[in-house]
Amino acid sequence: MLTVRDIRKNAILRLEGIGDDSARLDVDLLLAAALGIGVLDIILEPGRRVPDPGAALFQALLLRRMAREPVAQILGKKAFWNHEFTVSRACLTPRPDSEILIESALKVITDRQKTLKILDLGTGSGCLLLSLMAELPNSHGVGVDISDPALAVARANAERLGFEQRCDFIISDWAEQLPLSAKFDIILANPPYIALTEKPSLAPEVRNYEPALALFADDGGLREYRRLAKIIPGIIAGGGHAFLEIGWQQGAQVMDIFTKAIAPNINNIKNIRIIPDLAGRDRCVAINFG
Ligand SMILES: C[S@@+](CC[C@H](N)C(=O)[O-])C[C@H]1O[C@@H](n2cnc3c(N)ncnc32)[C@H](O)[C@@H]1O
């Protein structure tokens, strides 16, 4: 019978061979899942004997990873902020970079007990909406997406985390299907922002496994920001805040789009700023509406 050590060593070499930068971690996560034990057990018990069925299941998972399927999709889950989210090929895998939207929103909310209305445009797995709602016990959330399969994932996450009574999910091209009178205190949006020309340079995990609807936008990646800049002022409550994720080189352009698009007599911008992510790269445009 093979040991954890034997299996790990061989699998790490195979994943390094295909250029997997996180080969060690990926092997540990997949092996732990295949054996139904924790990652720490894998690391602390290298001499543990692996029964044949467990080894066979691990080899099947490893083959999927060798085909560049993301670990999160193989495992069907991904940690984001304070929770684990169900993920599938139908939705973007939540990225740690996006947590800056949650952090930034929480910084401007002075009273977390307040009844706040939150809108998440392009909700995908629901990770942004549900993470923020978890911090605001009296909030109500609406998650919008143009993809029905993505919304099914968001709904499943809302149910699993116990938020289904506090949120609605709506299929819509941005705000098109929202009630005309709807106004929100906080708007989150992580729209598709990758230029189609960048497609060949993306990692196969992204290019081949993440939904194109979640990734690509026309006009060099800026089209959806141009659309959202026209929509958001009409659906934000007075004094509300919007937080948009951006590509790390899009800060100046997105600021410019929003500053120019927002007419002074609707909801004027009180403040607009760029917020960097943990790596220090521009990641979020935050707008405070007067
Ligand atoms: C970058 S993903 C973000 C997913 C999730 N909010 C996150 O941060 O992980 C963009 C999402 O926007 C959705 N989307 C793209 N175009 C849309 C549109 N015109 N109206 C509504 N949703 C759209 C996609 O289906 C996808 O789920």
Image (cartoon, grey):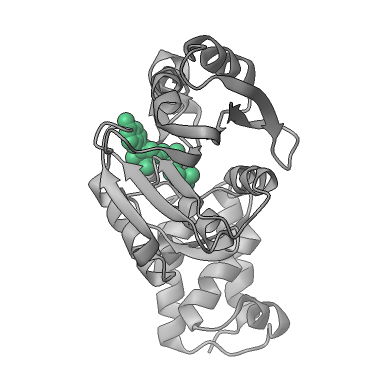
Q: Quadrant of residue 38?
A: bottom right
Instruction: Give the x, y percent position of residue 283.
Output: 63, 33
Locate the C terminus and report the quarter of the image it occupies: top right
276 up-or-down from 140: above or below: above
176 or 155: nearer the eye? 176
Q: Quadrant of residue 192?
A: top left
Q: Is residue 94 left or right of residue 96?
A: left
Q: How many marks?
A: 0
- Residue 242: image location, x then y, percent: 54, 34
- The residue sitting at 64% across, 79% down in the picture is 42
Residue 283 in sight: yes
Residue drawn at the location 41% of the way across and 71% of the way down = 162
x then y, percent, for residue 115: 50, 55
**Ligand 1 image position (quadrant):** top left
Q: Residue furthest top?
A: 260
172 to 168, vertically: above or below: above
Identify which residue is drawn at 60% across, 48% down: 102
- Residue for point 57% across, 75% down: 7
Of 237 and 136, the residue lying toward us: 237
Where is residue 202? Give x, y as percent: 49, 32
Q: Is residue 213 visible?
A: no
In the picture provided, is 112 more to the left or to the right than 131? right
Residue 251 versus residue 242: which sits nearer the camera?
242
Viewer-side residue, 147 vs 183: 183
Q: Residue furthest right?
A: 280
